[in-house]
Image (tube, helix red, strand yellow):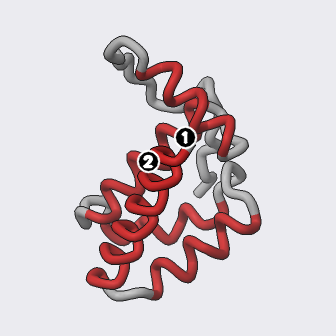
Amino acid sequence: MKQAIYSSRTADKFVVRLPDGMRERIADVARNHHRSMNSEIIARLEQTLLQEGALGDDQELRLDSPELSLHERELLQRFRQLSHRQQNALVALIAHDAELATEQA
């Protein structure tokens, strides 16, 4: 069986209406992560769905995504080895640290 090749032409598309200012905030965060806005949004949606257990067993297929850097791939592999409780604690810690950095800036 031939596997479908993912491209922007074959990808499922969905229009999203963003509140005022959100596009610029996403662009800033994406730039800081060296990703496109689309990749940033997908990464964040995947992370949320992963935390909620909504991605199922196909999540392992995402490790070879060309959108992931070597460091992101390593972090994702290590993150997936943690228990759900540990994952939640780590995400909360990172969010708290990012919040503090934003307040200090």
Placement of the N terminus among the 4 image quadrants: bottom right
CA neighbours of label 1 inside 10 A, class few (<14), some (14 to 19), many (20+) = some
CA neighbours of label 2 inside 10 A, class few (<14), some (14 to 19), many (20+) = few
Residue lying at 50% horizontally and 71% vertically, measured from the top left: 60
List x then y, in percent, for residue 97: 46, 62
Secondary structure found at label 2: helix
Above or below 12: residue 54: below
List x then y, in percent, for residue 104: 52, 48
Q: Which mark is residue 28?
A: none
Question: Which image quadrant for residue 64?
Answer: bottom right
Placement of the C terminus among the 4 image quadrants: top right
State left or right for residue 49 relative to residue 42. Answer: left
Above or below 65: residue 56: below
List x then y, in percent, for residue 62: 55, 61
Above or below 4: residue 53: below
Residue receiving disc 1: 40
Name the amino acid type tagged 1.
Answer: Glu
**Label pair 1/2, CB-CB below 8 angstroms:** yes
State left or right for residue 34 relative to residue 51. Answer: right
Return the residue nearer the eye: 77 or 32. 32
Residue lying at 55% horizontally and 82% vertically, measured from the top left: 78
Secondary structure found at label 1: helix
Name the amino acid type tagged 2.
Answer: Arg
Residue receiving disc 2: 44
